[in-house]
Amino acid sequence: MELHATRTIAADRMTVWAALNDAEVLKACIPGCEELTGSPEEGFSAVVKQKVGPVKATFKGEVTLSDVVPGTSYTITGEGKGGVAGFAKGAARIVLSDAEGGGTDLQYDVEAKVGGKIAQLGSRLVDSFATRMADQFFERFQALLEGHDGDDGRAEDIDGNGDGGDGDGGDGGDGDGGDA
């Protein structure tokens, strides 16, 4: 699957760059992120709990940055494993530029692959989920940098079934991959 978009953020390029490299900012913006540790130089480790359709899982993964041009661009590459639910891996090219009229244009191009139970759900559901995840990440990121209230920290209904995105009524589930 591929995703491409540009967002204009009302902050200067170096502020946006610093936020893109800050583990605490990223943790706050990644839907379902329970833990994010590491640094841009050494890479990041993450634990993310999500539900895609009937499949729920806790993904554990590693992320590295490459092709880094400070203040301008990098490629972020990662892979996460969710037990019986499957895996996700991919890369995103992030490019920052000065926006017309002020602020920063953040362009991203993502290529991702999934396998296991998640892949069996079908590309339409998986692509829709991935698009919502990316949208939520960048909405939170933009709100944080622009000083909006943005997200209140509660679980989002990413999968559209009204349960906060975890499929079990909001108690967080057991992360065992579900019963799908």
Image (spheres, rainbow, N blue to C red):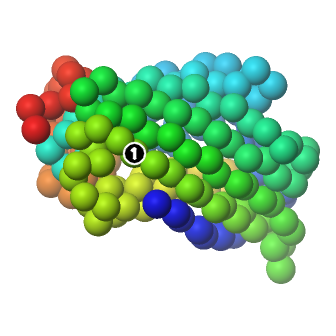
Instruction: Report crowding for label 1: few under 14, some 14 to 19, many 20 or more residues within 10 A (C-alpha).
Output: many
Residue that lies at the very extreme toward the bottom in this rendered image? 100
Secondary structure state at the residue bearing disc 1 = strand
Q: Position of residue 9 (x, y in %)?
A: 70, 64
- Image height of 161 relative to 63, above or below: below
Q: Residue at x 21, y 52 (%)?
A: 121
Residue 111 visible, this orientation: yes
Q: Residue at x 90, y 47 (%)?
A: 69
Residue 153 visible, this orientation: no
Image quadrant assignment for residue 124: bottom left
Q: Position of residue 23 (x, y in %)?
A: 65, 29
Q: Residue at x 44, y 40 (%)?
A: 88
Image quadrant assignment for residue 26: top right
Q: Position of residue 176 (x, y in %)?
A: 21, 22
Q: Residue at x 81, y 73 (%)?
A: 99
Residue annotated with mark 1: 114
Image quadrant assignment for residue 43: top right
Q: Position of residue 13 (x, y in %)?
A: 84, 56
Q: Going by the image, does 38 lie left or right of 171?
A: right
Q: Going by the image, does 29 lie left or right of 54?
A: right
Q: Going by the image, does 69 lie left or right of 83?
A: right
Work out which quarter of the rendered image holds the C terminus and state it. top left
Give the residue type at disc 1: Val
Nearer to the camera, 15 or 166: 166
